[in-house]
Amino acid sequence: MSWERTIILKSPSEIAVMREAGRINALALQAVRGAIRPGITTAELDEIAAEVIRQHGAKPTFLGVMGAYPYPATTTISINDELVHGIPGKRRLKEGDIVSVDCGATFEGFVGDAAFTVGVGHISAEAQKLIEVTYRALEIGIDHLREGNRVGDVGAAIQQFVEGQGYFLTKEYTGHGVGRSMWEGPQVPNYGTPGRGIPLKIGMVIALEPMVLVGTERTRVLKDKWTVASLDGSLTAHYEHTVAITENGPQILTVP
Ligand code: MG
Ligand code: MG
């Protein structure tokens, strides 16, 4: 999937506002993470995130985003083979599930966007490894978000690590610039060629988000027209942070 969107560099004062948006978003995700247990519904988790965002005077970024129909919730909650964009509802978490929660918060017009994957109770060794590899892929990618690098350096580093672990990355969904809009340029795929692509600049803010699949790079969209799952039903994981490229290197904005 390719698209062109404008790249908008942020000033230090704009990044300061984005840091607050990111902090609120991180607090919402932290509250959801703390509530994850067998038996809770994904709608209950969504309400926890919505409440934290409201309490801090922010707005849920995802609510109303246009797809086949307006997105109906604050978070996306994707379980096991579901990779991204799962709609919260009546489904109850079970021991052994792995759950990916993605959330956006808009504060004073700026967006924070972040996601994590966590196990419900005891999970398999394979599921645990998948989660760890996905988190490490995010860390490796973030370390490449520096002026002087190009978008391809970031994707190549993530791809080399994840594929080296025997896993797959979707080519259909990517990281992205973020600011007053949830999607700005540049598009930041989780694959690439070193030295290729758009040069990274101080003032860019990137939502970097490795989406890792155990058995295939191919995905399908479920009947609800939002949820994206692995084509083969294998487990998937997703981590995301909103990161500013600064003179002092990459700064993660989506931290509590
Ligand atoms: Mg996200
Ligand atoms: Mg994102």
Image (cartoon, rainbow, N blue to C red):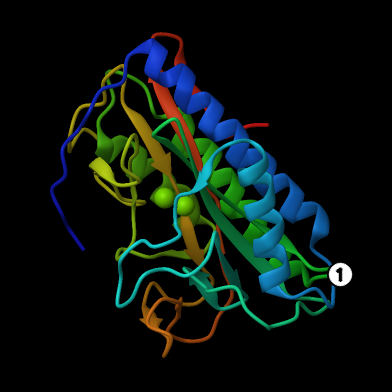
Disc 1 marks a residue whose amino acid type is: His
Q: Is residue 161 above or below residue 16?
A: below
Q: Is disc 1 surrounded by few (<14), some (14 to 19) or many (20+) residues within 10 Å?
A: few
**Residue ID at (63%, 32%):** 255
Q: Is residue 158 above or below residue 36?
A: above
Residue at mark 1: 122
**Residue ID at (36%, 22%):** 146
Q: Position of residue 33 (x, y in %)?
A: 75, 54
**Residue ID at (86%, 68%):** 121
Q: Nearer the viewer, residue 214 or 51?
A: 51
Q: Position of residue 214 (x, y in %)?
A: 54, 72
Judged left or right of residue 208, residue 75 is right
Judged left or right of residue 196, residue 172 is right
Specify the quadrant of the image occupied by residue 155. Answer: top left
The total of numbered circles placed on residues is: 1
Give the SS element for disc 1. Answer: loop
**Residue ID at (44%, 57%):** 62
Q: Position of residue 157 (x, y in %)?
A: 40, 41
The C terminus lies in quadrant: top right
Judged left or right of residue 150, residue 209 is right
Q: Is residue 37 above or below residue 102?
A: below
Q: Position of residue 151 (x, y in %)?
A: 26, 37
Q: Is residue 205 above or below residue 121?
A: above
